[in-house]
Image (cartoon, rainbow, N blue to C red):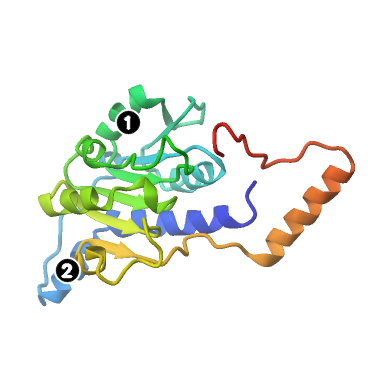
């Protein structure tokens, strides 16, 4: 259940997608060279957003991006029926999902199956000059493979909020890569008042013998 994190994830994802779509990263690079150079606009219909993970947060982010008119696709364990969103399901459809994704947003749960899922083989399936936005867990991304994809030009940029080790070691090349933007695991933080209200509501439901939301399937891991 969303206890305020959904809105925070919406803000983060939408702001970064627009940053890339309006080419602010390129204009910042031009500024460093003191170059006055208008750039060709990206076309919205070609700027397909692909969201990995269709839980509460994935649904919230898709809803927010939908209002901006971007083509949307999702990938998850099971197929979803979301209006105006193309759904892909299972490992057998992952490459097809990636093939048409210009901006990859990761919102997967942390399970044995998802550790290292964004690796060199998967990144190779993305179109050239794509972007990666990781808002889920650092272990989902093989960081060396991400850097290789950036250095080869396969990826145009990456925005990371989570890392394989936190705090990120000072020696990590992610700190110094010109096309990696970073925040210190702050995309969506627990807000005490909202969390306490949710806990109190859940305790009340349990005391009344009601079914509560947010239950974890231990076999699935989420």
Q: State the image quarter where residue 15 is shown.
A: bottom left
Taking the spot 36% from the left edge, 58% from the top edge, the residue there is 16
Residue 177 vs 199, above or below: the answer is below
Q: Position of residue 108 (x, y in %)?
A: 45, 42
Q: Which quadrant of the rendered structure holds the C terminus?
A: top right
Q: In this rendering, is residue 92 above or below 161? A: above
Q: Which residue in the protein does label 2 denote? A: 29
Mark 1 nearby-residue class (10 Å; few <14, some 14–19, many ≥20): many
Instruction: Please provide percent x and percent y for residue 209.
Output: 87, 38
Residue position for label 1: 97
Name the side, left or right, on which 64 lies relative to 199.
left
Which residue is found at the position 33% from the left and 65% from the top?
182
- Numbered tag placed on residue 206 in the rendering: none
- Viewer-side residue, 122 vs 43: 122
Q: Is residue 121 left or right of residue 10?
A: left
- Disc 2, SS: helix
User: Is residue 16 visible to us here?
Assistant: yes
Q: Using the rendered image of the protein, determine whether residue 24 is visible from the camera's viewpoint.
A: no
Circle 2 or circle 1, nearest the eye: 1
- Residue at image x 49%, y 26%? 78
Q: How many marks?
A: 2
Asked if disc 2 and disc 1 are in contact, CB closer than 8 Å, the reply is no
Which residue is located at x 47 percent, y 39 percent? 111
Determine the secondary structure under disc 1: helix
The residue lying toward the viewer, choosing from 134 and 23, is: 134
Which sits in the foreground, 73 or 3?
Answer: 3
Is the residue 112 above or below the residue 41 in the image? Answer: above
> Which numbered disc flags the more N-terminal residue, 2 or 1?
2
Q: Residues within 10 Å of mark 2 (few under 14, many from 20)?
A: few
- Residues under labels 2 and 1: Cα distance? 30 Å
């Amino acid at each position: 259940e969303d206890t305020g994190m959904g809105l925070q994830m919406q803000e983060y994802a939408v702001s970064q997608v627009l940053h890339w779509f309006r080419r602010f990263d390129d204009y910042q690079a031009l500024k460093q060279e003191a170059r006055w150079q208008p750039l060709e606009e990206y076309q919205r219909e070609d700027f397909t957003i692909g969201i990995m993970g269709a839980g509460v947060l994935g649904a919230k982010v898709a809803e927010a991006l939908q209002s901006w008119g971007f083509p949307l696709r999702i990938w998850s364990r099971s197929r979803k029926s979301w209006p105006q969103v193309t759904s892909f399901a299972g490992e057998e459809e992952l490459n097809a999902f990636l093939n048409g994704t210009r901006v990859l947003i990761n919102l997967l749960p942390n399970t044995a199956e998802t550790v290292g899922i964004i690796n060199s083989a998967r990144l190779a399936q993305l179109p050239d000059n794509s972007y990666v936005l990781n808002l889920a867990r650092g272990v989902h991304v093989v960081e060396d493979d991400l850097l290789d994809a950036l250095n080869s030009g396969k990826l145009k940029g990456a925005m990371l909020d989570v890392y394989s080790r936190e705090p990120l070691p000072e020696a990590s090349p992610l700190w110094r890569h010109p096309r990696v933007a970073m925040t210190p695991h702050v995309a969506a933080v627990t807000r005490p008042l909202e969390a306490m209200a949710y806990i109190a509501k859940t305790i009340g439901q349990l005391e009344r013998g009601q079914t509560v939301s947010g239950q974890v399937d231990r076999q699935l891991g989420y």
